[in-house]
Amino acid sequence: MSALRKWLFTGLLVIVPGVITIAVLNWIVGTLDQTLQILPGAWQPDKLLGFHIPGFGVLLTLLILLVVGATASNFAGRKLVQLGDGLVSRIPVVRSIYSSVKQVSDTLFSESGNAFRTAVLVQWPRDGVWTVAFITGMTGRNVKKLINLAQSVHKQARERVTTGELNRVIRAAVANWPPPMRQNRTAKILFATQVGTEPPTLVIKCNDAVLFDEEGIRT
């Protein structure tokens, strides 16, 4: 019985990938063949040849992509694309869907071809914790928004945080990452206030500074 079970699973490992691959390809070719419906009835390959050959829709789709790409690559084509983007961006519901799909397509199919090829380390979600992130593309989109955001962050960095807001954030941080006990005592932050902005300087009152190690202070 063990030999039969081994042969059965070995057969599945060999056959299943091939069957799924054929099924997916058949679905793709069948879907693309639907593009032939845009041709006049007299130009349908099935009527011209007298029998059905799968795959003509793939050739027609590639031809359409090439024509659209060639048209959008020149000056007039780019203007038409920008005009179309502007019109779509004014439609309330459609613009959110279109903009999301546009960003993904720009990331995956941009000429730079750098999508997900470069990994970087980002200090997130808090200081001392590093997360692996990927550069998804350098298309040049939203550069103005990014610059405006950076200027806004720089302006906010020079502002003073209110004492109430500062203590609320510290309480939330301590609740999420409570400091460990030292000398059978629990470190507690009693009060905090900001006394400087350049650089941001905080004064924190605690029950005993000895109870906070370097990691707890950095957190």
Image (cartoon, rainbow, N blue to C red):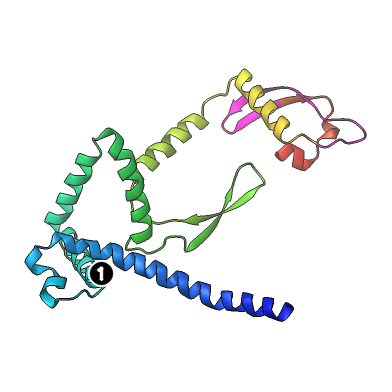
Which segment is the magenta one? Answer: 180-203
- Measuring from the top left, give residue 34's x and y in whole percent: 23, 61
The residue closer to the viewer here, 67 or 60, is 60
Please name the residue shown 70% across and 34% down the image.
Answer: 176
The residue pinned by badge 1 equals: 58
Please name the residue shown 30% across and 65% down the image.
Answer: 30
- Measuring from the top left, give residue 117's x and y in whole percent: 47, 64
* Image side of residue 21 versus residue 41, left or right: right
Query: Looking at the image, is 57 positioned above or below residue 120?
Result: below
- Residue 65, quarter of picture: bottom left
* Image side of residue 84 versus residue 205, left or right: left
As drawn, the residue found furthest toward the front would be 1
* Image side of residue 125 versus residue 109, left or right: right
As drawn, the residue found furthest toward the right would be 184
SS at mark 1 in the image = helix
Residue 190 is inside the magenta segment: yes
- Measuring from the top left, give residue 106's x and y in whole percent: 33, 55
- Measuring from the top left, give residue 187's x and y in whole percent: 82, 30
